[in-house]
């Protein structure tokens, strides 16, 4: 089903906005993409995938029934994965199958989500990260060639966060050289896995491993759940879809139960531990948590995923705000564009800056991840705790911030932002899930806090700590940092806030232990503060990384690009400094006058960025097919598109709905 949309002239307000631009848009796009060559590659891939128009639906997805929506998503997933398999991977290379470009291009096909997303997003990365070379040779080509379709079934009805509490068992039977998978209770049913309900024929299952009468904790197994020909569930497998959700409507999130279901011994993913034929358990992992590797990988990728979602929301809201006019400022003057209101700029410019902050930080995080993984392959796991702490807090804070900024984008679009055709509700509900999945916000910040408390104790006793907490060596024993309103001063203040909060947590725990509590209770009573301390640490990492990366990446940029990139980074620092004035007053020497000055400079910066706002979102270079928005298209023809989308409502298919004759008329006539 293809729909041909009329080509329209660009709305004069948007055209005027674009004339005001004073920087080279392409240069900024190149910085976001990671270089000119990357931009060219992305555009080439987008052309291949999108120029055939396969992404457009005659009937909007949201007007379909649950079943039709799923079937349409599968239809498009097959078209899309064929394009990926036959054309795109040739350009990106097989090793880059999870490239953000593929992810971004997929959005043009799926306003919501593809049922294949978890196959490529988690099943394949788990095969790569957790298999032996022999297992990889067996499974990976089939998975990449879509000969098998997988899901990642870890979470159960009773446990998502506490992985050690999972109940599914995998008991080794040495006589048959098989594992017996079993779901002993209702709470042990696998629950939530994307693509598991109806699509997948295989999945990775996390289960408690039992061999020679002993439990060795959770391990990963690859399990075929459906017949490859008939697609019927195999005997011993109970599988289905979990029901309607806030978003992820077409991802057929599923449940799965095992009734003494047997799989060959070779189906345990044995990179980090194995079970010999005789049932002997051998652990080769140098770190107990390496089986959690796929989660760390996804947490790392989610930071750039948040940048992408925020850039979509910001593009929609800013283009709309340039076209929308509301309220006379003075009698008989034309109504201003709502983008001229500083309150609107306050809601929206931080979204552009945050998309940049997350994008630049995500590249740095990705490089860190790659370096740590290279060390792990050589047997050195020393940097794993820091990577876990870093990926946990950046996943938590980036998803949470993206969610609240996207909600601001919706507010910024008034009533029309509430329309599904604006795409903002889809973006919001997709991002809402990211705050929970792959580790809930609070839970992950508490993981970071464990690392920070240890680092603080090391710094306190004069030992050097790892790079991302190096600021503790400088600040752990200082009371308040001297306020300085330069960017260096603001970054140091964020580090002082983090150090101050971590130190306060350590003191609270110690005081509680002194007054008779054991360590676990003292920790538990301090968790509200610990979450705040981990968030503060994450903010310190974000402001520092964003600033340093922005300076590094604009070294050879033209003067005006340097200026606008600099303005965005300063805006980001100021926004968060003003959000955290209470903390600044507590942990720095900032005065009321300093804060008033900061507020004024922030407002001046909003005004300075105003003429470039539309061009800054143009620099995200998001094609209309990817935006899917009646409010955010490049031409700005908002009202025409809203009307066009309204016509597609199934309720408009007939002038009078049958319910009038069945119910309303009898009610009016007193005959009901
Ligand atoms: C054709 C169309 C295709 C279209 C798509 C194309 C594009 C494809 C590409 C897609 C790319 C990107 C998109 C991605 C989308 C993904 C969608 C994902 C959907 C969601 C999936 C899921 O949610 S899967 C389930 C995830 N579950 C969780 O995250 C659970 C959270 N819980 C935990 O992680 C853990 O239980 C815990 C960390 C909270 C606790 O674990 P545990 O109890 O075992 O540990 P302890 O608390 O006792 O800690 C012991 C020590 O271990 C340290 N630790 C813990 N974890 C780790 C780790 N991972 N690494 C290193 N160290 C770790 C912990 O810190 C403790 O240390 P000490 O303090 O030193 O003791
Ligand atoms: C859209 C979506 C897709 C998903 N896809 C998959 C998938 O493909 N595969 C898969 O295996 N799973 C998947 N999940 C499951 C997801 O990973 C879990 O829901 C997530 O990890 C949270 O776990 P939970 O649901 O058990 O929450 P809970 O842990 O029950 O959390 C409930 C509340 O308790 C709090 N809490 C829990 N533990 C603690 C603690 N120790 N300290 C303080 N507070 C705590 C949390 O902060 C939260 O407020 C998906 C979930 C969603 C929403």
Image: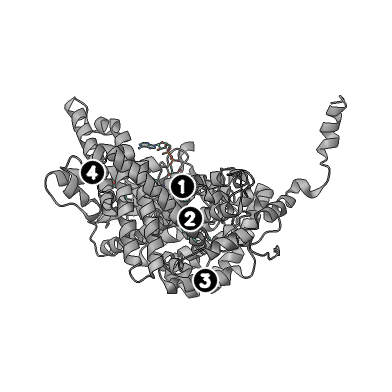
Q: Foreground residue, 586 or 79?
A: 586
Q: Image point 41% across, 52% down: which residue?
A: 605
Please name which of the two marks, 2 or 1, marks the residue nearer to the observer. Answer: 2
Please name which of the two marks, 3 or 1, marks the residue nearer to the observer. Answer: 1
Q: Which mark is residue 552?
A: none
Of labels 3 and 4, earlier in sequence is: 3
Question: Can residue 529 be seen at all in this image of the molecule?
Answer: yes
Q: Foreground residue, 469 or 24?
A: 24
Of labels 4 and 1, earlier in sequence is: 1
Instruction: Give the image location of residue 64, x and y in percent.
Output: 68, 50
User: Pointer 2: residues within 10 angstroms few (<14), some, or many (20+)?
Assistant: many
User: Pointer 3: residues within 10 angstroms few (<14), some, or many (20+)?
Assistant: some
Locate residue 561: give its quadrant: bottom left
Instruction: Give the image location of residue 590, x and y in percent.
Output: 26, 41
User: Pointer 1: residues within 10 angstroms few (<14), some, or many (20+)?
Assistant: some
Please name which of the two marks, 3 or 2, marks the residue nearer to the observer. Answer: 2
Of labels 2 and 1, earlier in sequence is: 1
Marks 2 and 4, how far apart at CA: 35 Å
Q: Which residue is mark 3?
A: 43
Q: Quadrant of the N terminus?
A: bottom right
Instruction: Give the image location of residue 103, x and y in percent.
Output: 50, 61
User: Pointer 4: residues within 10 angstroms few (<14), some, or many (20+)?
Assistant: many
Ligand 2 is in which quadrant of the figure? top left
Q: Which residue is mark 2?
A: 610
SS at circle 2 = helix
CB within 8 Å, label 3 to label 4: no
SS at circle 4 = helix
Q: Which mark is residue 499?
A: 4
Q: Which residue is mark 1?
A: 346
């Amino acid at each position: 089903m293809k729909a041909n949309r009329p080509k329209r002239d660009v709305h004069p307000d948007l055209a005027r906005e674009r004339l005001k631009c004073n920087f080279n848009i392409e240069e900024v796009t190149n910085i976001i993409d990671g270089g000119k060559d990357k931009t060219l590659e992305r555009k080439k891939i987008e052309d291949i995938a999108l120029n055939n128009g396969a992404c457009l639906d005659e009937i909007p997805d949201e007007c379909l029934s649950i079943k039709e929506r799923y079937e349409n998503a599968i239809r498009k997933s097959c078209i899309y994965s064929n394009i990926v398999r036959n054309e795109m991977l040739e350009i990106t290379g097989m090793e880059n199958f999870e490239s953000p470009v593929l992810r971004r291009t997929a959005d043009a096909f799926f306003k919501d989500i593809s049922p294949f997303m978890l196959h490529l997003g988690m099943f394949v990365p788990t095969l790569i990260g957790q298999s032996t070379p022999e297992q990889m040779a067996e499974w990976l080509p089939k998975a990449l060639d879509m000969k098998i379709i997988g899901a990642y079934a870890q979470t159960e009805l009773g446990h998502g966060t506490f992985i050690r509490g999972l109940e599914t068992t995998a008991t080794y039977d040495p006589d048959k050289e098989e594992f017996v998978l079993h779901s002993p209770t209702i709470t042990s049913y696998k629950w939530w896995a994307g693509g598991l309900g109806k699509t997948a024929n295989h999945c990775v299952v996390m289960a408690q491993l039992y061999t020679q009468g002993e439990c060795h904790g959770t391990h990963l197994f690859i399990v075929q759940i459906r017949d490859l020909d008939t697609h019927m569930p195999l005997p011993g497998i109970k599988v289905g879809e979990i029901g309607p959700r806030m978003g992820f409507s077409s991802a057929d999130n599923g449940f799965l139960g095992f009734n003494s279901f047997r799989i060959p011994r070779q189906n345990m993913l044995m990179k980090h531990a194995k079970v010999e034929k005789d049932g002997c358990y051998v652990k080769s992992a140098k770190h107990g948590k390496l089986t959690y590797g796929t989660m760390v990988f996804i947490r790392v990728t989610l930071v750039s995923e948040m940048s992408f979602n925020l850039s979509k929301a910001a593009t929609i809201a800013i283009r709309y705000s340039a076209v929308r006019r509301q309220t006379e400022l003075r009698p008989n003057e034309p109504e201003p564009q709502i983008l001229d209101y500083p309150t609107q700029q306050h809601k929206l410019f931080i979204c552009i800056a945050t998309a940049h902050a997350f994008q630049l930080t995500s590249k740095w995080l990705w490089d860190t991840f790659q370096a740590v993984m290279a060390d792990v392959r050589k047997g050195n796991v020393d940097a794993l705790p820091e990577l876990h702490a870093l990926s946990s807090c950046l996943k938590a804070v980036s998803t949470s911030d993206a969610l609240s900024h996207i909600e601001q984008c919706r507010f910024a679009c008034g009533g029309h932002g509430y329309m599904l055709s604006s795409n903002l509700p889809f973006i919001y509900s997709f991002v809402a899930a990211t705050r929970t999945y792959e580790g809930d916000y609070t839970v992950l910040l508490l993981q970071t806090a464990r690392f920070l408390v240890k680092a603080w104790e090391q710094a306190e006793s004069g030992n050097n700590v790892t790079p991302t907490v190096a600021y503790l060596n400088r600040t752990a024993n200082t009371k308040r940092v001297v306020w300085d309103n330069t960017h260096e001063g603001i970054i140091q203040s964020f580090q002082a806030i983090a150090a101050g909060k971590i130190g306060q947590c350590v003191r609270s725990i110690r005081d509680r232990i002194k007054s008779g509590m054991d360590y676990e209770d003292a920790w538990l009573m301090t968790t509200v503060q610990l979450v705040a301390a981990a968030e503060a640490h994450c903010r310190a990492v974000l402001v520092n990384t964003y600033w340093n990366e922005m300076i590094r990446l604009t070294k050879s940029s033209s003067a005006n690009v340097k200026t606008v990139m600099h303005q965005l980074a300063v805006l980001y620092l100021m926004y968060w400094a003003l959000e955290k004035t209470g903390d600044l007053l507590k942990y720095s020497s900032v005065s009321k006058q300093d804060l008033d000055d900061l507020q004024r400079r922030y407002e001046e910066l909003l005004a300075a960025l105003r003429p470039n706002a539309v061009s800054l979102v143009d620099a995200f270079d998001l094609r209309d097919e990817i935006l899917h928005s009646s409010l955010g298209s490049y031409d700005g023809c908002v009202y025409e598109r809203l009307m066009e989308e309204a016509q597609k409502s199934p309720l408009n298919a007939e002038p009078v709905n049958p319910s009038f004759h069945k119910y309303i008329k009898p009610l009016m006539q007193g005959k009901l």
